[in-house]
Amino acid sequence: MVKMDGSVETVLWVILLLQASAADATWWYISQVSLSHYGNSIRSNRRPLHPLVICGDIPGLIGRQRKLCRNNPNVMLSLREGALIGINECQWQFRHSKWNCSTLEKDSSVFGKLMLKVGSQEAAFVYAIQSAGAVYGITKACSTGQLPQCACDDTKRPPSKSRDRKGIFTWGGCSDNVKFGIDFTKRFVDSKEKITRDGRALMNLHNNRAGRKAVQKSMKLECKCHGVSGACTIRTCWYTMKPFRDVGNYLRQKYNGAIQVMVNQAGTKLIVAQRTFKKATRRDMVYFESSPNYCIYDPTTGSLGTAGRECNRTSKGTNGCELMCCGRGYNTVNVRKVFKCECKFQWCCFVNCQWCEKRVDIHTCNGPNPTKPPHSMFHRNRYFRQTS
Ligand SMILES: *[C@@H]1O[C@H](CO)[C@@H](O)[C@H](O)[C@H]1NC(C)=O
Ligand SMILES: *[C@@H]1O[C@H](CO)[C@@H](O)[C@H](O)[C@H]1NC(C)=O
């Protein structure tokens, strides 16, 4: 056996650790990179951000991604914003579900290793919403003039005056340059999947594209009226993306109707798992495996479990205590809730509200070994008003 010198051993260990973390890392980690230690150079044109810094902080980027990162540090900042928008929307969409899209601190896999290991419906959603968030973040940065690489999109503007149901309008304003956002996101995000080319990579590529398409689909015509006393004789119109909530709602529907697929014999294509199912379109989400049970805390997979989650006693949905707590029962506490009420509009322009108080029952899921009785038998809902 070869005896290793201590420092060589350390170096080898570091290399091994880096490789291990890189395998479980995704570009999503850019959302977790703190910008505070970069100081004022962020968003300041005078002292541009040193491109190597932010690119070096994201583990698991492949060569092509690092190069794009180094050459476009400002786009990376919008990509970071987009990743945060995606996470925020994911958590909102799944706030009532067992899996609630939470992110893990200091974990390069961001949503837990489960998302990378198991090709579940949730993984499909995460890839799609993060890709959509990236397109959205970059496109908004283009429109607000933060990126010299892109500006408003003029290509959708017809040569002269256009006509729609409401009459003639002229083009103006700034159409969101979704094309730049889509192209950059595709180049950056998809490049990692193109080096593996296994079944899971095909799944990720499909869902990444579904995310980009969802933003593209959300483009709408927005117009502003001009003319004497609001007569609207002239309108200026432009294309803009709908709020990201619309994209989130749309992708949530696609998640509900996600299509289970498998890889064909040659390993080159995804085909529907059951012949009676409809074929997946480019807008559909695809997945391989049924979802794991998100009931129990499991640090090895990153499943947080549902112990301590709030549930609704009467709901039959995923937020109902029965489903949410996986049959473990729940604990009920009666708490005081203060809120604004009886708001009256006063001329002009105040809204006067009273403070009201009500007692509400909050139900939270028991852990795997319940120590408390399943739930209290009595619940009180008293309303009373206080003058403020
Ligand atoms: C998700 O649920 C876990 C408990 O299972 C909780 O700790 C976490 O704060 C929740 N995350 C979000 C984003 O609501
Ligand atoms: C609980 O669910 C019921 C039925 O879905 C709904 O009417 C009620 O508003 C929910 N309660 C809370 C506190 O969300």
Image (cartoon, rainbow, N blue to C red):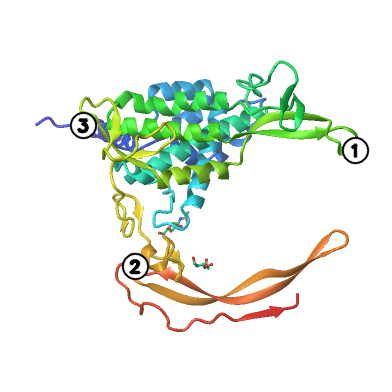
State how many labels appear: 3
Q: Position of residue 316 (x, y in %)?
A: 42, 65
Name the amino acid, label 1. Answer: Ser
**Ligand 1 under 8 Å from disc 2 Cβ:** no
Three-letter residue code for mark 2: Gly
C-alpha separation, residue under disc 2 versus residue under disc 1: 64 Å
Badge nearest the viewer, 2 or 1: 1
Asked which secondary structure carries label 1, the reply is helix
Quick one: label 1 or label 3, which is nearer the N terminus? Answer: 3
Q: Quadrant of the C terminus?
A: bottom right
- Helix, strand or loop at mark 2: loop
Residue marked by disc 3 = 5
Residue 286 in the figure: left or right of residue 343: left
**Looking at the picture, how far across and down is residue 250, in whole percent?**
50, 43
- On residue 316, the disc is none
Label 3 element class:
loop
Residue linked to disc 1: 229
Mark closer to the chain start, 2 or 3: 3
Mark 1 closeness class: few <14, some 14–19, many ≥20 residues within 10 Å = few
Q: Is residue 180 above or below residue 84?
A: above
From what the image shows, is residue 354 above or below residue 244?
below
Q: Is residue 179 left or right of residue 107?
A: right
Identify the residue under disc 2.
367
Does any portion of residue 29 appear in the rendered image?
no
x, y percent for residue 58: 43, 34
**How busy is the neighbourhood of tag 2: few (under 14 within 10 Å), some, or many (20 plus)?**
many
Q: Quadrant of residue 187?
A: top left
Up the image or down, 240 lies above or below 350; here it is above
